[in-house]
Image: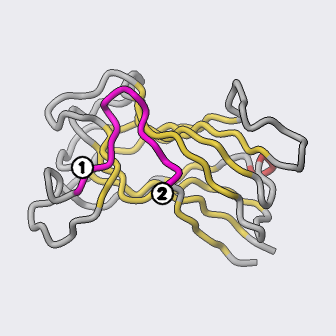
Amino acid sequence: MATHTIPILGFATRPDDTGEAFFEPIDLVFGSNDLARQFALRLGSSNAAEPSVKHGVYGSIRVPNNYVGTAVLVVEWSATLTSNNVVFDFDYRAIGGNDAESLDQATWQESVTVTDAAPTTARFKLTPTVALTSANLTALDIVEFFFGRDGADGSDTMAGSAWVFELSLQYSDT
């Protein structure tokens, strides 16, 4: 049995309509050395104010053919701020079968949350994880999801932006 990790953010991901979540080149605000110039998901449009709404991105991924279980969401993020907490939410529904389930669902199958403290040094990478209910996923399912920051949660106290560099699904195979 091996552990695998697949990226979730990609072409099938789009920001919500709040204006608080968007993909941004990191050299614009986050980076100070401008060596790396990739995009990161910015959660919170102001780096001087705490967002007050739940905001994020919608997307979908395919559960790999070799999926067996132990599903874990991995968030790799950072901030230029060094105090207080961020609350990340992941809401999803796995849809499988042939002519068995609608791709137009009205509710999420599961909603999970992870609270993480800001880095102790600006721009240091943080990697919180949260377990998903492994039985919800089956190999080759399409997983529709919402991932974001819950600025409306009282535990989200960081007064500024969080930059998500990678969002991954970790799982085990046969």
In front here: 117 or 23? 23
| Mark 2: secondary structure | loop
Q: Residue at x 64, y 39 (%)?
A: 92
Q: Amino acid at mark 2?
A: Gly
Q: Residues within 10 Å of mark 2 (few under 14, many from 20)?
A: few
Residue 79: x percent and y percent?
24, 49
Q: In the shown orientation, is residue 29 left or right of residue 138?
A: left
Q: Which residue is mark 2?
A: 10
The answer to whether 57 appears left or right of 69 in the picture is left
Residue range of the region highlighted in magenta in the rendering: 10-25
| First in sequence: mark 2 vs mark 1 | 2
Tell me if 50 is positioned left or right of 148 in this view.
Answer: left
Q: Is residue 101 above or below residue 163?
A: above
Q: Amino acid at mark 1?
A: Ala
- Does the segment drawn in magenta span residue 105? no
Q: Nearer the viewer, residue 115 or 53?
A: 53
Q: Is residue 9 above or below residue 93?
A: below
Residue 82 drawn at (x, y percent): 20, 46
Could you give the CA–CA distance between mark 2 and mark 1, rounded to whole angstroms?
Answer: 21 Å
Secondary structure under tag 1 reads loop
Q: Is residue 7 above or below residue 148?
A: below
Q: Quadrant of the C terminus?
A: bottom right
Q: Nearer the viewer, mark 2 or mark 1?
A: 2
Residue at the spot 21% in from the left edge and 70% down from the top edge: 36
Q: Which residue is mark 1?
A: 79
